[in-house]
Amino acid sequence: MNNKRALFYLMAGSGLGNAARFEALYEEELHHKNYELHIYCWGRSLQYLKKKYEDKPSINLHPLSPYNLGHDKDGLSSYDFFLSIPKYIKTFLINSRYIYSQAITHRPKLSIHDSDYHYFALMFAKVPRFAISQSWMIISRWNYLKGSNLKTKVNFILYEVLELLFSYMFSSKILCPSFSKRPISSTEKILVVGPIVRKAFQSTYPKPSKFLAVLSGGSGIQREKLLALATKLKADDFLSNIDSPKTNYYESIDPSGVPILSKYQGVIIQAGHVLISECLALGVHFLAVPIDNHPEQFINTLILQIEYNKIDDKLAGAQEEFTKSINSQIIGQTKCEGAQEVALLLKNFLDTNS
């Protein structure tokens, strides 16, 4: 007789941050043998997790039809978003039908959605739905958009406001990881937790031996911009190359489990939520450079500048100023206990509803 409790975990795949958050939760709670874990994902998340967990029989990986994040050489594109709506709807219906059939077969106790919107299939199957989304943090700092362009403001509505609205209407609870220092209110539906970071990034390592590295973001969007920076500053560069034989995205953790980030005195990164959280957890000097017209990344950089006193990447000579500042002060590691908080919530929910 199978006494395992089935769990569904659904995640977006345009970048690699969602896969990193899954890893953190897998380390804390989801690895236990009493769970029958089913992962539904696409794109870069699927490619990475296939490599990472190919030898884990306890993980059932289910490919979904992919969505393509609208972007061009100028960054995130609302124009491409609107053009892609018919394709998005078709893909959504195909995926939803498959997920519903899976829910009827496996009868999960809970579905966890990380920037994923396939709620209807689980609603009809009467499965509780937890969302993991940083949109509440971004929307709570909407006033930081004041200096942004019109494209970024439009994308704020398309990507952040709609994500929160959709999650709020159709999920049972929203778990919002936040690295903002300023208080963000929790509600009955939305629970703010700490940054969700893998254990390797919460450890202490010897003093860095190398000076500067540049890392591209997990989506690969505008990586040329960062490669040009690496060349200009004579820094080591790391691309999010999931097509390489290695299992480690960004090559950010080497085979011994030590993050490459920890080997550098300073790093320049794209301004994604997870990579920023990892830098804060390690206590490494970093400069975050947002993808153009990307509202989340734009606000992330303003949080860092206003609340952490980080250098403004838009200032003339910002990169040179950053390199000069690397040795000027000791950076403390930030507590990032979101994975532990979410793990406890999941455990309590499943124990109560088993």
Image (cartoon, helix red, strand yellow):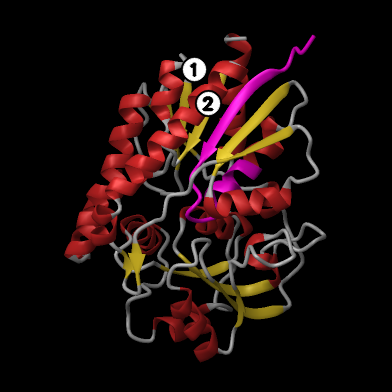
Q: Picture coordinates of residue 223 (x, y %)?
A: 48, 74
Q: Amino acid at mark 2?
A: Ser
**Residue 69 location, quadrant:** bottom left
Residue lying at 69% horizontally and 79% vertically, measured from the top left: 210
Q: Which residues are magenta?
A: 1-23
- Disc 1 designates what residue? 127
Q: Picture coordinates of residue 346 (x, y %)?
A: 58, 24
Q: Is residue 121 left or right of residue 61?
A: left
Q: CA distance from mark 1 to mark 2?
A: 7 Å
Residue lying at 41% horizontally and 43% vertically, measured from the top left: 134
Which quadrant, please, contains the N terminus? top right
Mark 1, residues whose alpha carbon is within 10 Å: few (<14), some, or many (≥20)?
many
Does residue 264 appear in the picture of this structure?
yes
Q: Picture coordinates of residue 247 (x, y %)?
A: 72, 58
Seen in the picture, residue 60 relative to 233 is either above or below; the reply is: above
- Based on the picture, tell me whether residue 192 belongs to the magenta stretch: no
Mark drawn on residue 111: 2
The residue closer to the viewer here, 348 or 19, is 19
Instruction: Verify CB contact (< 8 Å) between mark 1 and mark 2.
Output: yes
Residue lying at 35% horizontally and 39% vertically, measured from the top left: 184
Which quadrant, please, contains the C terminus? top right
